Image: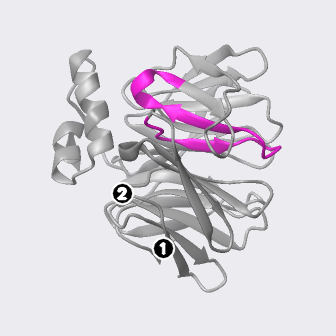
Amino acid sequence: MTIERDSRELAAAHMDPPLQRLLDAARQRNRLVPRAETAPPVAKGVTTIPVGHSPHSVAVSPDGTRLYVTEFKGNSLSEVDLSRGEVVATFPVGEGPYGVAANPDGRTLHVTVPETETLFVIHLPDDEQGSGFGHAPYGVAAGPDGRRVYLALALEDRVFVTDAFAKGDFGTFTGLDFPVGVAVSPDGRTLYVTHYFSDQVSIVDIADKALLGRVPVTIGPYGVAVSPDGDRVYVAHFPFDSVSVIDPGREEVVGTIPVGGAPRGVAVSPDGTHLYVTNFFADTVSVIRL
């Protein structure tokens, strides 16, 4: 089956203002090129967990027992008990939450809300507070030491490094074209950044702030996650129903996992055995055994 890929129409039809802002900026730069692509069949054996309205991003607790899912149209964050496969708690986090990252301390979550230019910090089980800082954060990642938070500022072509309250300025990575998703390697040395309109993933040396390479991927790279051993990088393609598997050492795609429902966010279990993918149009999270 061939599907016409017009992201502008998709964004307008599903009322996603942050993505619409990106699309408008890309149009001004003449970066939108209508393309068509064959949708892959959905992989067999994939289970799904029902969640809230328009799940955007997903993170896994360090102990592997919980998922945390931002609900874009639900204006909340859902907590999923993986042993039960169901939502057990919700947190209000402002209008249109996007990214979520679980801090390695096991007690803290970081949530981005681009429309209100806010970074929320949630201290589990039930304390939350937001910090506005004058920039629209899309993707978010927490460093392995838990002291640094990486924010993809898609409208500014950079990734900003700060603390949990967006008060510290620990540096910036510039020259990154429309960065939407961001992930940090387990050793804290490497940054992976998705570029939604150029269909690439950047590999960046954190210490030297140097671009190590760019990996071409299929259309619409969005959320990104790294395996616990650092040997694989997973990229969700919105709304194009697949997850790319990258070998960062070879800097190339080595596999594709078909999913359904317009994947946006992706996360890997701490033991590396399962992949979790949000399905923005289906209101579910796919659980894939690796």
Relative image position of residue 214 (x, y in whole percent): 57, 20
Q: Is residue 150 left or right of residue 89?
A: right
Q: What residue type is labelled 1?
A: Thr
Judge by depth and name the residue closer to the eye, 14 or 171: 171
**Residue 137 magenta:** yes
Q: Using the numbered discs, state the Cα–Cα distance from disc 2 to disc 1 in whole angstroms.
A: 25 Å
Asked if residue 180 lies in the magenta stretch, the reply is: no
Q: In this view, does 181 lie above or below 160?
A: below
Nearest to the eye among marks 2 and 1: give it. 2
> Is residue 6 visible in the rendered structure shown here?
no
Q: Residue 135: horizontal and vertical position, in percent?
A: 45, 33
Q: Which residue is drawn at 71% across and 26% down?
A: 170
Look at mark 1 in the image and give the residue it sits on: 48
Residue drawn at 79 percent across, 67 percent down: 63
In the rendered image of this protein, does residue 214 appear above or below residue 153?
above
Three-letter amino acid code of the residue under disc 2: Glu
- Looking at the rendered structure, the secondary structure element under dot 1 is strand
Q: From the top left corner, tell me how far across and down residue 52 is, in percent.
A: 40, 72
Quadrant of the rendering where the C terminus is positioned: bottom right
For label 2, the SS is loop
Q: Nearer the N terminus, badge 2 or badge 1? A: 1
Q: How crowded is mark 1: few (under 14 residues within 10 Å), some or many (20 or more)?
A: some
Mark 2 sits on what residue? Answer: 95
* Left or right of residue 254: residue 1: left
Residue 87 visible here: yes
